[in-house]
Structure formats: structure tokens, C-alpha cells
Amino acid sequence: MLPLPIRSTLPGIAGLLAVAGACAVGIPPSTASTATAPDVAALAIPVTPAGSPHDFDFDFELGRWHTALRRRPHPLSGSGIWADYAGTTTVRPVLDGRANLVELDVSGPEGHLQGLALRLFEPKRQRWTLNFSNAASGTLAAPMTGGFGGGPRGVFYSAEEFDGRRVLVRFVIESTSVDTCRFEQAFSADGGVTWETNWIAVDTRT
């Protein structure tokens, strides 16, 4: 599934805080500081091991899913409020498996969220970029980069502006069984020392 970022305007990765696809858990907001976050280049970003076929990295997620989503409407504010949504996520392979397209459509008491993500593989660096957008913004957020490192758990990062400060964004995609997968998005305002989860989604295959 895809994560929808969270910008102060909601829609983008920091602006889509949140909108995305599938699954997670959290760290108390009080642990986040207001320190200036460094660039993503300072983090160890997972890549596809040399010689491994990247085409299959997202095979576990292809198809149609029921999505149960929770997002934190006010990240890095000390708020413990969460909003719940439910709906569907559809993942399709494109470019003969060298990329895939994700569509999210969920609703809840806080409204209706629609978003998409285009995942592209970068052969030169052996990594994926996750490119997000949602119906409300109509634009692409800053891409996240990362990979699976040869396992069932993918980790992706980007640097974003949120409420006037630079934060690191982490998105985790994990295959938890043949018919379920989990996604989690978190922000760090102190360079990755502490993280606050703001997006949790669990997808169940339909």
C-alpha cells in the first residue's frame, strides 16, 4: 500500500501525513525534539543486493486489498489523537515489473482520502524510489528512497519540511503473511534519534 505523507497542509509525504497504504506502531510524540534534521544521505538506506532480481521485491503486494488505516492528524505536536479509515488498496505491476502503481481509497469520520504511489527501481543505485500524490494536492511529494535488502521488510526515507522545520520521514513496508502486509510512517525532528509514528495501515488480501 502506499503512505501518504504529512505536510502541514496534509497531502504529500509530510503533507499526506498522511495518506497511504498498508501498516505500523508508534513512539510517544513527546520524544521528538525540534532539532534540525540532517539530509537523508546521513542514513543507511537499504538497497537490493547485487545480483538479486529487483523485479520481485513488491510481488507480495500485487493485487487488491482491504485497508484498515490509522493516522495521527497532528504529528509532532504532543497530540495523542488518531483518526481511523477503511477502504481498499490496489497494486498493479507496470513496465514489466520494473515498477508498480498503488491506488488507495479510504474513508472515515475525518473524511475521504484518495492517493497513489508510483514505485520505480533505479538500476544504477540498486534502490527504489516511492513517489506519492493524492487527489487533494494533485502534485507529487518529494520521493522516498530505499529498498528491501533481500528480505520481506522494506525501509524508505526522505527529508521534508513540516510546520517550518526540517524532518526526516521513514516509511516501512512489511509482508507479514501471504495475505497480510503492514505499513508504517514516522517522523523524526532530531536527525533519526527518536521517531514518532503517524501513519499505520494493515492490508488484508481480498
Image (spheres, rainbow, N blue to C red):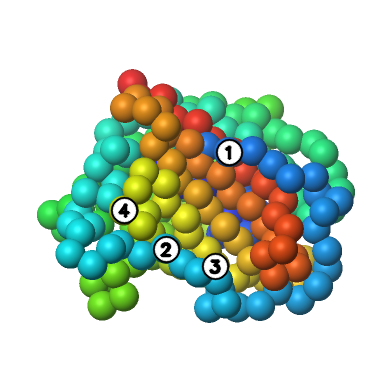
Specify the quadrant that holds the C terminus: top left
Specify which label sits upstream in the sequence, 4 or 2.
2
| Circle 4/circle 2 CB separation < 8 Å | no
Specify which label sits upstream in the sequence, 1 or 2.
1
Q: Label 4 vs label 2: CA separation? A: 9 Å
Residue 97 as seen in the image, left or right of residue 86: left
User: What residue is drawn where x is 81% and y is 49%?
Assistant: 29
Residue 53 as seen in the image, left or right of residue 30: left
Q: Tell me the residue that label 1 is attached to.
A: 24
Specify which label sits upstream in the sequence, 3 or 2.
2
The mark lying in front, picked from 4 and 1, is 4
Q: Label 4 vs label 3: CA separation? A: 21 Å
Q: Which label belongs to residue 150?
A: 4
Q: Tell me the residue that label 2 is attached to.
A: 46
| Residue 159 percent coordinates (x, y) | 60, 71
User: What residue is drawn where x is 35% and y is 48%?
Assistant: 151
Identify the element where label 4 is drawn: loop
Q: Tell me the residue that label 3 is attached to.
A: 158
Q: Label 3 vs label 2: CA separation? A: 13 Å
User: What residue is drawn where x is 37% and y is 54%?
Assistant: 148
- Vertical placement of 9 versus 113: above or below? below
Q: Label 3 vs label 1: CA separation? A: 18 Å
